[in-house]
Amino acid sequence: MKHSSFPSTGRWEIRSRDHKTGQDNIEIFDFVLIATGHHGGPNLPSFPGLDTFKGQTMHSKEFKDALGYTGKRTCVVGIGNSGGDVTSELSKYCQTFLSTRRGVWILHRLAKNGMPWDYAFHTRSRKWALSLMPRKFRDYLWQKELSDKIDHGLYALQPRNSPSSTHPTVNDELPNRIACGMGEVSLPSRDQMRRDFDRHYAAIREQYVDTPRHTFQVDWLPYMDELAELTGCKPNLVWLLFTDPVLFVSLVFGPGTPYQYRLHGPNPWPGARQAQLTVLDRIRKPFATRALPKTDNSGMTSFLQKVGIIALVTCAVGYGVHLAKVKGIDIWDTELIHSLGLRT
């Protein structure tokens, strides 16, 4: 802060506190230097169409907050530290596009154990160890470290240059903003969402006791299937019945696990099928405290039960479709399905 004699002396008063003793200290200085770095001057890019653009253009140096951008459509050009910060703020209030020419490596502020990254990185021991390694191996280690928290290729951010040949962008929030706004699914209209909410809330009031505990209860598997259908990762049981009957049986009669939503659709996981088929092994493992004699008919009994259930379900569905055709009923009529309390 300015010293009381600032008008005549130009001096500054600096107050600090000793973190060990808690004692406040006051020192007087003739000058105070504020180091803003070498990026203080704005760099305005030039590209075709900018001179005829009728919207608002500004440099990040002029950006103060995102409150005035609610409902607008914005584009941030460049993914340096300022571009990443502006994108993170704007995307909370409006539709935001991020344009990057070369991509960037994202660096988080905190390293292992929550220590500031620069304190953990800039040590002599680390520098000595890295100096003994070939550059390509150093780049491999650094790239692996940067990718532990975010897959740069998956997020379409990975540049051609190695981490040691370009400046990373320090930003903890940007990956979260990209992940929650991929643009693959659009929200329904406000009226449609309100109708769906009212329908769901009415079902809760009808099923559960009237207490504050049951205000947002959902039936997990149907609810997850509904979300999976919107995002395109719901398992196609009819297709699996003919192409992978073993997996079909596991999905129908086994536990409803999150693995099933990584089988197909966006970002499938190659290990999802095996994880789904072996989930019962992991469930049973803690109970295997002693060896039991094997029985000869337990496996056959379980198999026959599943075959019988599948046959029963197939006959029931076939008869239902046949009956609907005879009576001229459209079985895919969404209003009819909702009236029966079912979900599309």
Image: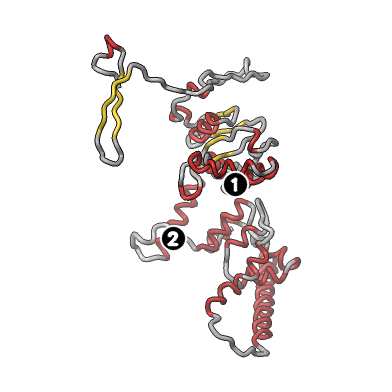
Check disc 1 and report the residue beneath it: 145
Which image quarter holds the N terminus?
Answer: top left
Task: Tell me what residue is drawn at x 67 percent, y 84 percent.
Answer: 299
In the current view of this chain or complex, which residue is farthest to the top?
8
Q: Is residue 204 above or below residue 169?
A: below
SS type, badge 2: loop
Answer whether labels 1 and 2 touch (C-beta < 8 Å). Answer: no
Residue 146, located in which quarter of the rendered image?
A: top right
Amino acid carrying label 2: it is Gln
Name the spot of residue 269 as percent of width and height, x first.
Answer: 66, 57
Q: Is residue 197 above or below residue 260?
A: above
Compared across the picture, whether 111 is left or right of 237 comes to left
SS type, badge 1: helix
Amino acid carrying label 1: it is Glu
Task: Tell me what residue is drawn at x 64 percent, y 58 percent.
Answer: 262
The answer to whether one can see residue 173 in this image is no
Name the spot of residue 33 as percent of width and height, x first.
Answer: 41, 20
The answer to whether one can see residue 117 in this image is yes
Name the spot of residue 239 as percent of width and height, x first.
Answer: 72, 63
Q: Is residue 93 above or below residue 133?
A: above
Q: CA distance from mark 1 to mark 2?
A: 40 Å
Report crowding for label 2: few under 14, some 14 to 19, many 20 or more residues within 10 A (C-alpha). Answer: few
Residue 159, located in which quarter of the rendered image?
A: top right
Task: Tell me what residue is drawn at x 29 percent, y 34 percent.
Answer: 17
159 or 260: which is nearer to us?
Answer: 159
Which image quarter holds the C terminus?
Answer: bottom right
Check disc 2 and report the residue beneath it: 217
148 or 209: which is nearer to us?
Answer: 148
Report crowding for label 1: few under 14, some 14 to 19, many 20 or more residues within 10 A (C-alpha). Answer: few
62 or 342: which is nearer to us?
Answer: 62
Name the spot of residue 94 as percent of width and height, x first.
Answer: 51, 34
